[in-house]
Amino acid sequence: MLLRLLLSCVLVSVAISTQAMTLYKSTDANGVVFFSDRQTPGAQAFVIQERRVERVRRPVLDVPTTKQAYRYPFPWRGGPFRLTQGPNGSFSHTDAKSRYAMDIAMPEGTPVIAARAGVVVKIGNDQLGRGPDPSGNFVRVQHDDGTQGVYLHLKQGSVSVRAGQRVAVGSPLALSGNTGNSSGPHLHFVVQRATEAGLVSIPYEFNLPVGTLPNFALGK
Ligand SMILES: [Zn+2]
């Protein structure tokens, strides 16, 4: 009896420290799944535990949001240029594919170079102006850790790499442009990872603050 009492005390204290809560999952006649905190016949019960120390707002999607250890050198030559839209920018960095993208305003024709080594997996080079693809002309590079660096809105006909080609940090890829869904000459650079839900963008950082210095890091 004493043991049972002790045990229930332990259970209560665990529940308090982890904020446990029971939810019931049911499916209605139309196949719509919904959750409730009240039990209904046939509902599947499960306990959600949330530790108090981790009460941070999480992004809507279940994407890996840990920052990458790799810090990206600027994927352009010249500058300094300005960051015109950062991660979670309300203008267009709102969906899963572009949430953590950065837009850097730069004159059309600025050399765009690889910010990380990898293999080119896809390019677009034929689009003029807004065209059919919102990305405009682009280069997609698969990095060795499985992530992909994507360089968008490039100038028509300027892409100088092809799919299957290995590139090093600093390899010329194309010239910047203003193609696709672009409201002015800029480079949209995003790092993505393939998930079951499709490609999602992941946070990344440049190895210098944007706008501080011309990019002399590569000696070119
Ligand atoms: Zn952008």
Image: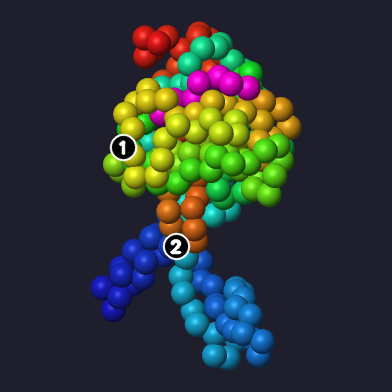
**Which residue is label 2 attached to?**
196
Q: Amino acid at mark 1?
A: Arg
Q: Which mark is residue 166?
A: 1
First in sequence, mark 2 or 1: give its number. Answer: 1
User: Circle 1 sits in a helix, a strand or a loop, which is it?
Assistant: strand
Residue placed most toward the observer, 3 or 34: 34
Q: Which residue shows up at 54% across the image and 73% down it?
A: 23
Crowd around label 2: few <14 · some 14–19 · many ≥20 (10 Å): few
**Quarter placement of the N terminus:** bottom left
- On screen, residue 134 above or below 195: above
| Residue 159 horizontal side relative to residue 136, left or right | left
- On screen, residue 54 above or below 29: above
Q: Which residue shows up at 66% across the image and 45% down it?
A: 134
**Residue 90 can be seen in this image:** no
Residue placed most toward the observer, 30 or 102: 102
User: Circle 2 sits in a helix, a strand or a loop, which is it?
Assistant: loop
| Residue 52 horizontal side relative to residue 219, left or right | right
Q: Position of residue 130 (x, y in %)?
A: 71, 40
**Residue 214 can be seen in this image:** yes
Q: Which residue shows up at 30% across the image and 75% down it?
A: 4
Q: Position of residue 138 (x, y in %)?
A: 53, 39
In the image, the segment drawn in magenta is: 108-114
